[in-house]
C-alpha cells in the first residue's frame, strides 16, 4: 500500500490490487476516510496511519456501491458510513451482495479477514449537496453511469477532486449503467477538474490536473466510439490496451449488444 500526501489535509492511499484508491481528508479536528483499500493488512494499517498523520478519525464516506470501495468498516467497525442516496438505495436493493463479492474475492485469493463486514446502517446523503467536516464542507456531485449510483467529492480548501471510478489512468471507462450517464458525469466533472490541483481516480490514485484533463479527453473519445454502430472497433486509449483492458472492452461491447438486442 502506498500513501501520498497531496495537501496538508489530504492523504491518498493506494491498494496493491487494482490500484484502488482511498482518501483521508482532515478539517478542524475531524477526518474522514473516503473509500477503502482492499487487502486485510492494508485495512489494518489505517488507524495507525491516521494517528501518525494526526488525522482524528470521525467517519467513513464511499463514492459508490461497488464492494471494493466499501471496506472501511473493516478498519473502523461501527463507524458512520455516508453514501449518496442512490448508493444507499442500491445497497438496500441487494442485501448481502457486497459481502458475497468480498467473500468470492477472498476465496480466490486465499485471504482471511478478522471479522465479517457489517454494512447495516448507512447515512444516505442528498446529492448534489454538502457534507460537513470540522468547520468546512465537502461538495457532493452526482457521478452515475459507471454504476447506477455514486458521487464525486470536491474538497474545496485543498482543491482535490475525488471522482470515484472515473478518469482512471489504468482502467478504460466501464459504463456498466449507461454510456449517456457516464458522459454526463464527465461533463459535470470537467469544471471541477479545471479548478483542481489533484484528482483522485478510484483506480490509479492521485493525478495532476493536466493528466486528468488528458484522460477525460481520451475517455470521451473511447465512449463516443463505443456508442457507434461498430462498438467492437472502438480504439482503446493509449496506455490502457493490455490483455485485461481488452477483456474489459469486450465486456463493454457485450453489455451494449445485450442492451440493444431483441
Ligand atoms: Zn472500483
Image (cartoon, rainbow, N blue to C red):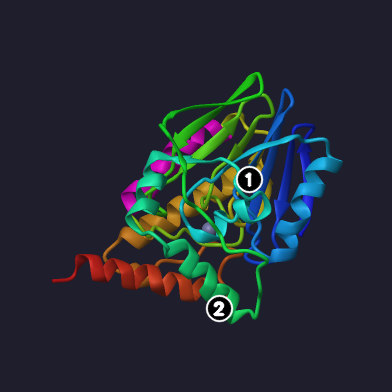
Q: Residue at x 52, y 47 (%)?
A: 216
Q: Which residues are magenta?
A: 178-193
- Of 29 and 171, nearer the camera is 29
Quarter location, residue 86? top left
Question: Image height check: is 146 above or below 246?
Answer: above
Residue 183: image location, x then y, percent: 38, 46
In the rendered image, the quadrant that contains the C terminus is bottom left
Question: Image height check: is 87 above or below 57?
Answer: below
Question: Image height check: is 251 above or below 74?
Answer: below
Q: Is residue 68 magenta?
A: no
In 3D space, how far apart are the residues under numbered discs 2 and 1 (Cα atoms)?
24 Å
Residue 147 relative to residue 230: left or right: right
Q: Residue furthest left?
A: 262
- Of 113 and 142, nearer the camera is 113
Per the rendering, the mark at residue 200 is 1
In the rendered image, the quadrant that contains the N terminus is bottom right
Disc 2: CA contacts within 10 A as few (<14), some (14-19) or many (>=20): few
Q: Residue at x 51, y 50 (%)?
A: 166
- Of 72 and 76, nearer the camera is 76
Residue 42 relative to residue 211: left or right: right
Residue 135: image location, x then y, percent: 65, 18
Main SS of residues in magenta: helix
Residue at image mark 2: 243
Amino acid at each position: 500500500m502506498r500513501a501520498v500526501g497531496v495537501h496538508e489535509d489530504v492523504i491518498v492511499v493506494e491498494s496493491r490490487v487494482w490500484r484502488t484508491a482511498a482518501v483521508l481528508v482532515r478539517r478542524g479536528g475531524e477526518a474522514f476516510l473516503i473509500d477503502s483499500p482492499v487487502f486485510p493488512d492494508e485495512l489494518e494499517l489505517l488507524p495507525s496511519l491516521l494517528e501518525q498523520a494526526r488525522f482524528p478519525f470521525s467517519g467513513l464516506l464511499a463514492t459508490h456501491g461497488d464492494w471494493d470501495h466499501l471496506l472501511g468498516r473493516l478498519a473502523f467497525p461501527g463507524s458512520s458510513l455516508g453514501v449518496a442516496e442512490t448508493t444507499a438505495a442500491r445497497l438496500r436493493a441487494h442485501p448481502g451482495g457486497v459481502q458475497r463479492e468480498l467473500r468470492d474475492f477472498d476465496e480466490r485469493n486465499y485471504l482471511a479477514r478478522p471479522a465479517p463486514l457489517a454494512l447495516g446502517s448507512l447515512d444516505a446523503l442528498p446529492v448534489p449537496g454538502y457534507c460537513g467536516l470540522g468547520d468546512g464542507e465537502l461538495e457532493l456531485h452526482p457521478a452515475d453511469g459507471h454504476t447506477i449510483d455514486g458521487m464525486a467529492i470536491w474538497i474545496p480548501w485543498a482543491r482535490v477532486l475525488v471522482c470515484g471510478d472515473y478518469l482512471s489512468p489504468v482502467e478504460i471507462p466501464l459504463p456498466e449503467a449507461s454510456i449517456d450517464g457516464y458522459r454526463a458525469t464527465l461533463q459535470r466533472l470537467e469544471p471541477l477538474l479545471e479548478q483542481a490541483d489533484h484528482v483522485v481516480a478510484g483506480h490509479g490514485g492521485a493525478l495532476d490536473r493536466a493528466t486528468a484533463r488528458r484522460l477525460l479527453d481520451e475517455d470521451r473519445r473511447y465512449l463516443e466510439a463505443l456508442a457507434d454502430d461498430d462498438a467492437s472497433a472502438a480504439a482503446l486509449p493509449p496506455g490502457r490496451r493490455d490483455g485485461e483492458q481488452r477483456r474489459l472492452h469486450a465486456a463493454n461491447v457485450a453489455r451494449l449488444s445485450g442492451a440493444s438486442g431483441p
